[in-house]
Amino acid sequence: MKLTTTLMASTAMVMAGTSAFADAHMASEMTIVSWGGAYSASQKAAYHDPYSEANGVTIVNDESSAEAVAKLRAMSEAGNVTWDVVDVVAADAIRLCDEGLALEIDFDTQLANGDDGSTASEDFGDLLVSDCFIPQIVYSTTAGYRTDLVGDTPPTSICAMFDLEAYPGMRSLEKRPINNMEWALLCDGVAKADVYDVLETEAGQSQAFAKLDTIKDNVVWWSAGADTPQLLADGEVIMGTTYNGRLFALIEEQNQPVGMLWDAQVFDLDGWIIPTGLSPEREARALDYVKFATDTQRLADQAMYISYGPARASSAPLVGQHATLGIDMAQHMPTDPENAKNTFLYNYEWWADYRDDLDAKFQAWLSQ
């Protein structure tokens, strides 16, 4: 397989070349934090294993990214930062950077140039949303549904989530306000362009919670990306939201009777931050790792294992077939034109400002 051959070749080059970056002043072990499941498995295959093999570094995998902000705040306060590289969404990276908990990066000197000759800042372009954030993938949060439980009329709109008459049964939604509040307003008649202006007001927040109230008793709330795929596989929910890569694995790799609902999928960015407060040896190792893991070939390699779009423009032409399934991956990307007909653009800057307040209100609403 062409891309597999390319991966093997590129790994051999890394073994010969990346060690030139490594020296006695770098730590020999590092803890990398991510989200678990199919996503962490794709990182292990595309980044961790080749890097470890090339440099003799022991990588400890941690799956605590959902709690990254709170845990890094606690580690910093205690003066004991135990994580070396952390995978976070863009909004969390902005918060961590603003709070001085993430290292600022000089993209054009500390990251690799693109294989097409572009600088890192040119290659990543508008995805460099924070001085501390190193983009890795474009992904979406979207919905899946049981094809055998929705009757003769499969859902085509995210608003099916709120239609208990047409689609009776349990749903699964993430246990946080992000995305749920936006979808609630969209399905209550708010225009897409007005969602965040409405959500900024007390009346708009009340409107979103009122819409969510209509299905609250029919929702299983999830906090781990693996939850909805398992609930769908077990038939415990008729539909539910999760990351598009999780649904890809469920449908294409596990052959479950599940369909993908791309309508109003919420685009977001995911990438690396390096915590502040590391020793010079650990910081040097972390920087060496992210330079490797975010080069053109590595980001394309990850797309062999999961349906997330690589963040570098120079990586997109290298996306080919799935490493084991042999299927063309381009059509499974959230950015594919057919899938992206009606997307919702997540406002990470807005959520960086309002997240703490709405998190508290959302948890209070859940407990009512």
Image (tube, rainbow, N blue to C red):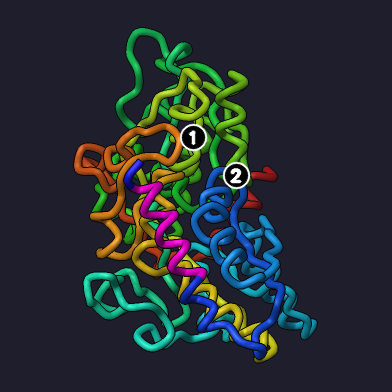
Residue type at mark 1 is: Ala
Residue 110, placed above or below residue 267:
below
Residue type at mark 2 is: Gly
| Magenta region, residue range | 3-15
Within-10-Å neighbours for mark 2: few <14, some 14–19, many 20+: some
The verdict on residue 11 being magenta is yes
Question: Which of the two labelled residues, at mark 2 and mark 1, occupies the earlier sequence position?
Answer: 2
Quadrant of the snapshot with the N terminus? top left
Q: Looking at the image, which residue is at 44% across and 54% down? A: 8
Query: How far apart are labels 2 and 1 at the CA level?
Result: 10 Å
Q: Which mark is residue 249?
A: 1
Q: Nearer the viewer, residue 43 or 351?
A: 43
The verdict on residue 150 being magenta is no
Judge from the rendering whether residue 261 lies leftward or rightward of residue 42; answer left or right: left
User: Which percent across, then down, holds residue 46?
Assistant: 49, 56
Tell me if residue 360 can be seen.
Answer: no
Q: Looking at the image, which residue is at 60% across and 44% down? A: 37
Label 1 SS: helix
Residue 227, placed above or below residue 136:
above
Question: What residue is disc 2 on?
Answer: 37
Q: Nearer the viewer, residue 17 or 245?
A: 17
Q: Are marks 2 and 1 in contact (CB under 8 Å)?
A: yes
User: Which percent across, then down, holds residue 80?
Assistant: 78, 81
Label 2 SS: helix
- Where residue 96 sits, quadrant-wise, is bottom right
